[in-house]
């Protein structure tokens, strides 16, 4: 248990005791005690801090194969402890479009490939509807390269630990446009608190690269009512792509 959790429990117990007594309970007199993290929590935080403090050796002109090799060796955050496979990314080496998702799920962790299973099948349909394909003109990567436990969203420190890899991938791939799939992707790419509900369908700029955000395919599977606005986002993205290369989907 963390020290913050212990403090919250103490305050809840104090408030309950005060209410029962009708005044300040003598059992909770004095200042709030100084709690500390349980040993296993302290060790985990220390390990994550030590891992994240070492920046990966990535030159500005690193090749994609070198970047992916460094990703496969990474132990910069606690996610490395539970992974089966690292998932650097997948697609063509000189993509027209870079698709950025959140992080690997269970199937991705098993196969070492991004966006497989039902969400991956839906993503392929979404891309195909606007003339894109991971086999022809796209590269697919994630904010984090290892699966978060129980498919939860990546923690800020996990995303920060992986950020040098994403930046290096963007520099090496030189995509003409970026499609962010979901709030985690756009929030971390731009270091913003705004998510897909506010930013979807807008054309943003990342270091001169146009970016459009839409719902993550897994979110669309959970809430099919968002497929219509997601399709409108894809049409916006297609218009951006046509403005860059009019014949890209022929």
Image (spheres, rainbow, N blue to C red):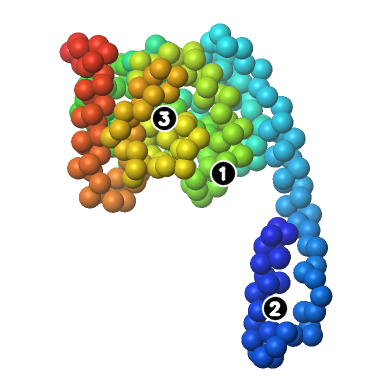
Foreground mark, 3 or 2, reads 2
Q: Secondary structure at mark 1?
A: loop
Relative placement, left or right, of 145 versus 222 is: right
Residue assigned mark 3 = 100
- Residue 123: name its quadrant: top left
Q: Residue furthest left?
A: 250
The quarter of the rendered structure image containing the N terminus is bottom right
What secondary structure is found at the residue carrying circle 3? strand
Residue depicted at x 72% and y 31%: 53
Q: Judge by depth and name the residue closer to the eye, 79 or 208.
A: 208
Residue 236: which numbered mark, if any? none
Judged left or right of residue 43, residue 225 is: left
Mark 3 / mark 2, whichever is N-terminal: 2
The earlier-in-sequence mark between 3 and 1 is: 3
Residue 81 visible in the displayed image = no
What is the x, y in percent for residue 79?
61, 40
Q: CA distance from mark 3 to mark 2?
A: 46 Å
Q: CA distance from mark 3 to mark 1?
A: 17 Å
Cβ–Cβ below 8 Å for labels 2 and 1? no
Q: Residue at x 29, y 22 (%)?
A: 133
Q: Earlier in the sequence, mark 2 or mark 1?
A: 2
Tag 3: Cα neighbours inside 10 Å, few (<14), some, or many (≥20)?
many
> What residue lies at 30% left-to-right and 33% top-to-bottom?
202
């Amino acid at each position: 248990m963390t020290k913050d959790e212990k403090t919250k429990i103490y305050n809840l117990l104090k408030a309950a005791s005060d209410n029962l007594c009708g005044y300040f309970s003598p059992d909770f007199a004095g200042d709030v005690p100084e709690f500390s993290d349980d040993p296993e929590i302290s060790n985990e935080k220390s390990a994550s801090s030590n891992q994240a403090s070492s920046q990966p050796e990535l030159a500005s002109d690193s090749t994609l194969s070198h970047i992916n090799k460094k990703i496969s060796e990474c132990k910069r955050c606690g996610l490395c402890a539970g992974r089966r496979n690292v998932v650097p990314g997948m697609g063509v080496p000189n993509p027209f479009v870079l698709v950025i998702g959140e992080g690997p799920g269970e199937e991705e962790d098993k196969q070492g490939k991004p966006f497989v299973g039902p969400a991956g099948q839906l993503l392929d349909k979404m891309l195909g509807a606007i003339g894109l394909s991971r086999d022809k003109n796209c590269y697919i990567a994630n904010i984090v390269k290892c699966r978060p436990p129980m498919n939860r969203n990546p923690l800020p420190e996990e995303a920060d630990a992986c950020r040098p890899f994403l930046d290096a991938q963007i520099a090496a791939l030189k995509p003409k446009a970026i499609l962010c799939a979901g709030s985690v992707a756009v929030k971390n790419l731009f270091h913003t608190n705004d998510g897909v509900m506010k930013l979807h369908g807008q054309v943003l700029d990342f270091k001169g690269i146009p970016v459009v955000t839409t719902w993550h395919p897994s979110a669309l599977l959970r809430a099919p009512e968002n497929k219509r606005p997601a399709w409108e986002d894809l049409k916006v993205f297609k218009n951006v792509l046509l403005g860059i290369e009019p014949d890209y989907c022929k």
